Image: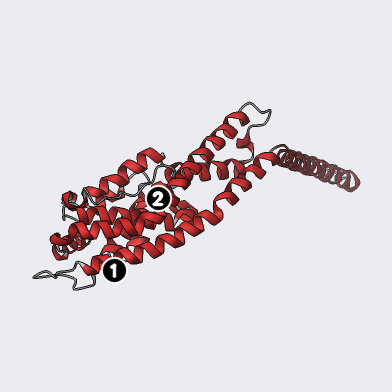
């Protein structure tokens, strides 16, 4: 059997096949270009449609930028003063572990607690966080040295532990950490209980000015939380929900969540009539220092903000 091979017909067939392949490729490319163009047009339209929300977000952020910076700076000054008050009531302690100034121990303990709360400060409800923070006024009674939760590099370790379980209440784990418990025990041992009332009064005096500022800030923050909630509620009725502009939506929710926590934060102030009645004077001071550390780091509440 003989086969004949028509070169011209073969070339025509190959060209037809290549043309078909090219047509399919061209049609696909044109479809991708059209889809991309539609997507860009939608993004441009949404940017204009949601521009009023973007401007309100910027206005709210700017409203608090300087205030937060100022109160954070003041918080640092008050922390230093309270640290010196700790040193002033130091009576030493037989068998002391650290032999470090009490100001260093107190501020380290307070910063460790603040870092343990940091992940949740960015998104948990304000009243919930206020309750958990307030629980620290019984700190010295709640410690239970049973584990090695963190080391001297506690900031980075607490961040990593947060992301390993974002729902974990790290402050509870910290209360069981051997190193943290030693700091708390050392503080309690070396503070002169006979000067507890004097210590608490000096601390409250140092906090008086920033307490007034925080009170005003709480009220303003609560009003802004309501404003943002109203914005988000109204946007649900729009033709295009604000969730279709994720940066604006995320920005509004982020500042709302932080302001909600801020609206519930308060110091524990002590007056002269009650200053001698507190057995937990050390824990009260640490709690107030925790609040001061939180105010200092407002812009980075929530470990996510630093990633």
- Please rate how many residues cluster around mark 2, counting C-alpha atoms within 10 Å: few if below 14, some from 14 to 19, many from 20: many
x, y percent for residue 301? 44, 52
Label drawn at residue 84:
1
In the image: residue 140, left or right of residue 121:
left
Task: Out of 284 and 113, give the one closest to the viewer.
Answer: 284
Residue that badge 2 annotates: 119
Task: Give the Cα distance between marks 1 and 2.
Answer: 29 Å
Above or below, 128 against 296 in this view is above
Q: Quadrant of the N terminus?
A: top right
Residue most extreme to the right: 8
Residue 9 sits in quarter: top right
Which residue is located at x 62 percent, y 31 percent? Answer: 235
Name which of mark 1 and mark 2 comes first in the sequence: 1
Above or below, 199 against 24 in this view is below
Task: Out of 153 and 131, give the one closest to the viewer.
Answer: 131
x, y percent for residue 68? 50, 55
Task: Out of 173 and 220, give the one closest to the viewer.
Answer: 220
Which residue is located at x 33 percent, y 66 percent? Answer: 81
Label drawn at residue 298:
none
* Proximity of marks 1 and 2: CB atoms separated by less than 8 Å: no
Which residue is located at x 31 percent, y 47 percent? Answer: 133
Residue 208 sits in quarter: bottom left
In the image: residue 175, left or right of residue 208:
left
User: Which colour assignment does the render follow?
Assistant: secondary structure
* Helix, strand or loop at mark 1: helix
């Amino acid at each position: 059997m003989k086969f004949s091979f028509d070169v011209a017909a073969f070339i025509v067939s190959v060209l037809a096949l290549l043309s078909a392949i090219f047509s399919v490729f061209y049609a696909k490319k044109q479809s991708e270009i059209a889809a991309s163009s539609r997507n860009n047009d939608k993004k441009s339209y949404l940017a204009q449609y949601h521009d009023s929300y973007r401007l309100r977000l910027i206005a709210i952020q700017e409203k608090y930028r300087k205030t937060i910076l100022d109160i954070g700076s003041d918080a640092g000054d008050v922390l230093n003063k309270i640290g010196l008050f700790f040193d002033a009531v130091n009576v030493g302690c037989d068998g002391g572990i650290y032999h470090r100034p009490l100001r260093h121990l107190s501020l380290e303990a307070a910063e460790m607690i603040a870092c343990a709360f940091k992940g949740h400060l960015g998104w948990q409800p304000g009243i919930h966080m206020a309750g958990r923070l307030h629980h620290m006024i019984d700190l010295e009674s709640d410690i239970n040295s049973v584990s090695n939760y963190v080391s001297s590099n506690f900031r980075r370790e607490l961040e990593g532990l947060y992301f390993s379980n974002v729902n974990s209440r790290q402050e509870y784990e910290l209360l069981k950490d051997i190193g943290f418990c030693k700091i708390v025990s050392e503080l309690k041992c070396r503070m002169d209980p006979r000067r507890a009332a004097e210590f608490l009064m000096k601390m409250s005096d140092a906090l008086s000015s920033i307490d007034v500022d925080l009170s005003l800030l709480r009220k303003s923050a609560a009003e802004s939380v309501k404003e943002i909630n109203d914005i988000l509620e109204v946007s649900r009725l729009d033709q295009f929900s604000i969730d279709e502009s994720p940066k604006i939506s995320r920005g509004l929710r982020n500042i709302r969540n932080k302001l909600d926590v801020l609206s519930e934060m308060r110091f524990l102030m002590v007056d002269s009539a009650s200053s001698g009645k507190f057995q937990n004077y050390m824990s009260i001071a640490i709690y107030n220092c925790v609040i001061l550390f939180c105010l200092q780091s407002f812009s980075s509440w929530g470990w996510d903000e630093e990633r």
